[in-house]
């Protein structure tokens, strides 16, 4: 993946186990991008909107978001909504992660403007496949640079 | 003319005539007494008023109902038995009726509110009839206290409400539980696979370098066996949870009821299960089916599930034969899916619609959801499902649905 720009992958996932499995499988798929994990929707929003203490979003780094839908307090769909409402942040590719394939939820996230939607199946081989494809997607996608927010 | 002038015969005639009058007067008096007694002892309150609304009579039941004695009310406006704002409106109402003949209660009857002497109010059934006499008209009101009935009605409504809420709550619980329980399951499955992978690597490394029989045994049989059981458990739990999730979604899915061409639907289902039929060595016969009202996707699911079961439970002793037929009965379309399979014993028939209930868990695949889902679908669409079956001979599942409008009877 020599043509992969050093995109920083931001994972918002309240389940540490899920986050670790995603990291492991991304690594197996050949992706060695830096990954930053957030435990809930609020902390990733604070990072993106450069609120509160460090870490803060770097203005010259391309990012990609992996958002779990179900999180306590601010959930993934809400993060997606806020990101897509911001005229700069909306350029960031957002991939939704969920344990359900509830058609209404899928539709809602697409309507909010997510780039892709991945179901975390219990079947681990399928899960690994999904993440591998995700890795391929990440390596190919053009991630735009986000200018600084005033 | 004095009596002295009458002949004896004439006198007898007079006496007889007198006797007749007096006995008819007694009879008249008797019947009036009787009527009064009937009115007085009637269970319903009976109140008569004149055209202006002035109370003329009130029976005992009415006295008891309103807490007034008849003497207190007779001669007063009947509106004292009503709470505001009816009290103020009543004269106007009577006036209006006298002039337009437009009745709101007279000759109709309705539920109204009465007010007792002590000021308390109570719901009552009021029926008013109009009596036209030679020189005037009076209105008779029959009143009955319906406090108890109202209370019961309200209790029933509250109960229905609670039930609906509980049901919704249950569906939410099922949904949330099945959804949230999958999350840890992803970890159990994922990390046990990771463990298996790590174990495999350790074995490879050890195989080259060392030769420790106990360690080898652990790595090549004990650990893999444990992981296998964990994974089988996870797979089973996942299947149950998906079943739960599907079931809970059913209750919330939007449905659109439309006329259904069942011949078309069944022939499509038949196409989709051709392979299954061939594998089971079974035949499917579909008769002429009446149209009905239902949600196309969900009713398709019902018949797919029924046919799936019919094929699944063929009796290995004879070639399977599944027949689908239909008829009209009392304004409903009745369909039957009959098979000559293994059948269901009487004592198990009540349980086949239970969620996750499986009669032959070892020998056939499935989640134990097909009939539960069919029943749930039909419940929401004014449909019914029931069965007749004999162990060792076969089963017939019946589905009843409302007929489509404009369907000729006996088609």
Image (spheres, coloured by chain):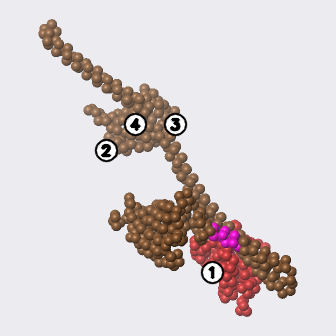
Chain colours: A red, B brown
Pointer 2: what residue? Answer: B100
Of badges 2 and 1, nearer the viewer stands: 1
User: Is A61 positioned to the left or the right of B75 in the image?
Assistant: right
Is residue B233 on the magenta stretch? Answer: yes
Q: Which residues are magenta?
A: B231-240
Q: Name the element at disc 1.
A: loop
Residue placed furthest toward the front: B317
Q: Residue at x 66, y 79 (%)?
A: A126
Of badges 2 and 4, nearer the viewer stands: 4
Chain letter for the residue marked with disc 2 in the picture: B
Of badges 3 and 4, nearer the viewer stands: 4
Q: Residue at x 63, y 70 (%)?
A: B239
Neighbourhood count class around disc 1 (C-alpha, 10 Å): few under 14, some 14–19, many 20 upward: few
x%, y% of residue B264? 42, 74
Query: Do residues under tags 3 and 4 come within 8 Å of each other at their CB atoms?
Result: no
Is residue A51 on the magenta stretch? Answer: no
């Amino acid at each position: 993946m020599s043509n992969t720009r050093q995109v920083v992958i931001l994972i918002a996932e309240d389940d540490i186990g899920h986050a670790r499995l995603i990291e492991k499988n991304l690594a197996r798929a050949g992706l060695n991008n830096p990954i930053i994990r957030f435990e809930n929707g609020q902390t990733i929003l604070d990072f993106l909107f450069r609120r509160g203490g460090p870490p803060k979003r770097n203005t010259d780094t391309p990012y990609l978001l992996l958002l779990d839908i179900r999180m306590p307090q601010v959930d993934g769909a809400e993060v997606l909504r806020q990101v897509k409402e911001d005229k700069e942040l909306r350029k960031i590719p957002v991939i939704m992660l969920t344990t359900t394939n509830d058609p209404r939820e899928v539709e809602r996230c697409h309507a909010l403007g997510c780039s892709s939607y991945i179901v975390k199946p219990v079947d681990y081989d399928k899960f690994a496949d999904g993440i591998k494809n995700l890795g391929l997607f990440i390596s190919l996608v053009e991630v735009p640079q986000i200018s600084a927010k005033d | 003319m004095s009596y002295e002038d009458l002949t004896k015969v004439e006198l007898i005639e007079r006496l007889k005539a007198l006797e007749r009058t007096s006995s008819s007067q007694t009879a008249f008096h008797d019947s009036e007494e009787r009527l009064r007694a009937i009115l007085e002892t009637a269970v319903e309150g009976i109140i008569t008023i004149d055209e202006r609304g002035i109370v003329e009579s009130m029976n005992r039941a009415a006295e008891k109902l309103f807490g007034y004695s008849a003497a207190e009310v007779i001669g007063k406006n009947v509106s004292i038995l009503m709470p505001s704002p009816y009290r103020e409106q009543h004269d106007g109402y009577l006036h209006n009726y006298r002039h337009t003949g437009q009745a709101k209660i007279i000759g109709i009857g309705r539920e109204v509110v009465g007010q007792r002497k002590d000021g308390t109010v109570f719901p009552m059934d009021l029926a008013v009839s109009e009596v036209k006499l030679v020189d005037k008209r009076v209105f008779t009101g029959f009143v009955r206290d319906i406090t108890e009935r109202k209370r019961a009605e309200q209790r029933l409504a509250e109960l229905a409400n609670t039930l609906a809420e509980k049901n919704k709550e249950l569906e939410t619980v099922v949904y949330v539980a099945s959804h949230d329980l999958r999350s840890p399951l992803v970890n159990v499955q994922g990390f046990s696979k990771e463990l298996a992978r790590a174990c495999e690597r350790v074995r490879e490394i050890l195989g080259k370098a060392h030769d420790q029989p106990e360690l080898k045994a652990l790595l090549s049989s004990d650990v893999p066996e444990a992981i296998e059981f964990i994974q089988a458990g996870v797979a089973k739990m996942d299947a149950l949870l998906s079943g739960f999730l599907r079931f809970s979604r059913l209750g919330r899915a939007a449905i659109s009821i439309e006329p259904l061409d069942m011949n078309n639907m069944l022939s499509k289902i038949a196409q989709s299960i051709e392979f299954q039929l061939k594998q089971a060595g079974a035949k499917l016969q579909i008769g002429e089916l009446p149209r009905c009202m239902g949600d196309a996707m969900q009713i398709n699911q019902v018949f797919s599930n029924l046919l799936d079961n019919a094929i699944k439970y063929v009796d290995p002793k004879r070639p399977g034969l599944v027949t689908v037929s239909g008829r009209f009965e009392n304004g409903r379309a009745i369909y039957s899916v009959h098979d000559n399979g293994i059948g269901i014993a009487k004592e198990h028939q009540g349980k086949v619609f239970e969620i996750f209930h499986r009669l032959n868990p070892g020998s056939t695949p499935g989640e134990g959801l097909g009939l539960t889902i069919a029943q749930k679908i039909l419940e929401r669409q004014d449909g019914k499902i029931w069965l007749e079956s004999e162990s060792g001979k076969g089963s017939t599942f019946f589905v009843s649905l409302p007929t489509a409008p404009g369907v000729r009877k006996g088609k």
